[in-house]
Amino acid sequence: MTYNSTKEFAQSLDQADELARFRESFTIPKHVDGTESIYLCGNSLGVQPKKAVEYVADELNDWAQLGVKGHFDKTFPWTRYHEFLTDSMAEVVGAKPHEVVVMNTLTPNLHFMMVSFYKPSGKRRKIVMEADAFPSDTYAVDSQIKWHGGNPAEDIILWQPRPGSSTLMMEDLETIFKNHGDEIALVMIASINYYTGQFFDLKKITELGHSHGAMVGFDCAHGAGNVDLKLHDSGADFAVWCTYKYMNSGPGSIAGCFVHERHADNDQINRFAGWWGHNKEERFLMKPKFDPIYGAEGWQQSNAPILSMAPIRASMELFMEAGFDNLLAKSKQLTNYLEYLIHNIEGDRIKIITPKDPKDRGCQLSLAVKDADKSLFETISDKGVIADWREPDVIRVAPVPLYNSYMDCWNFVQILAAAL
């Protein structure tokens, strides 16, 4: 598409957008003047689906009216509540339903997966990560290595950008494996780097890791609901993600987990077991020997947090109604349009460090601010923009296709240009 930077053009794109109606299904936070904020922070916390209020209220009411009987005697019984999210979640992350389970929160899921898939032995004990991984991933990997008696300073190999670049090159990861392939036990990389917004080729990374005998897992916190992950086709051994970003489940809410089907009934895999992962037919027979459910559900520990799951059910219904392929198509166009507008800002204080090729990114654009001291971010925030600042010098913005408009992008760039 050929873009132009007029307000009328942005309005025409919104008028032609068949997904524009979904914005009305969300509550957009208000600015101090009572108008809707320009909310471009879905990469950090998605906005609230209006039906989330209704669905949480339903569960509170059932709790009040039914008590313990709500586990069984209702339309969405609590013992099966996570199952009502499985099919839609599997579709969004590109997996088979038995490869996906909604459970726990993100970093606990990462730990549970590393219990099963990080198996250091002999000289094969190193973990490969991207150099600027999200801190929680780094803390988790550090602690797992220490738990196994290793030294993080020696047992972590960092995939680093080249001098003068922000993004990572596949050739450099190949070099790491060429030099250390027989020492690497696990590849643990984000699907999308939280800082730069770079979307990695999960299939190529997995094939590379497996060809050298390593297990491969991904933190998809910034990818799930944002890009076409194709987790099953990637061949990854496992993946984890949160749902409060692009899937709009609410602050600190429930997370998701993928385990490839080749591990679905492998009884040789260690795991931290709990009764919700036990054979459903015998769960309430209280048998002492653990019999895991086939697939990802077998990694569950405890019964589901229903009040956290209700909002994600509301959001996933909207994903299915809109169609994930349609959302991906709008995301690409919306992000391309925002990129075009930003490039038309005069001066050199803003540089987009997110890859230019749409196949190498989702809807997040990371804007490096020259001579940054956060004042620019504070200025645009005062004008009604809700974005995200990451030290030392990046403003992250994410035009989310479910609820953001082309006018959101246009208004943001007018505010940013004026502030500059």
Image: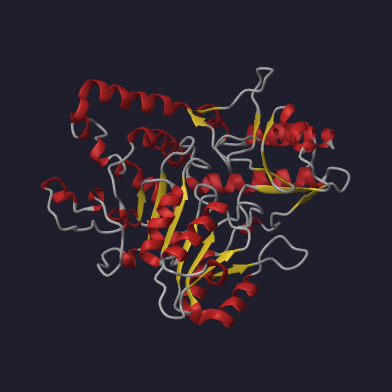
Q: Nearer the viewer, residue 400 or 249?
A: 249
Which residue is at a point 29% across and 53% down the rendered structure image?
297
Which residue is at a point 78% across and 44% down the rendered structure image?
342
Residue 356 point in image, percent of width and height = 71, 56
Q: Is residue 267 left or right of residue 381?
A: left
Residue 390 point in image, percent of width and height = 67, 45
Residue 36 point in image, percent of width and height = 64, 24
Which residue is at a point 61% across and 38% down the rendered structure image?
41
Q: Check the image and report above or below for 275 versus 121.
A: above
Q: Quadrant of residue 317?
A: top left
Q: Nearer the viewer, residue 76 or 257?
A: 257
Q: Check the image and report above or below for 109 versus 37.
A: below
**Image quarter of the C terminus:** top right
Query: Residue reaching furthest top?
Result: 34
Say how many tags the image has. 0
Q: Nearer the viewer, residue 322 or 47?
A: 47
Q: Is residue 3 left or right of residue 401?
A: right
Residue 166 point in image, percent of width and height = 71, 60
Residue 1 showing in the rendered view = no
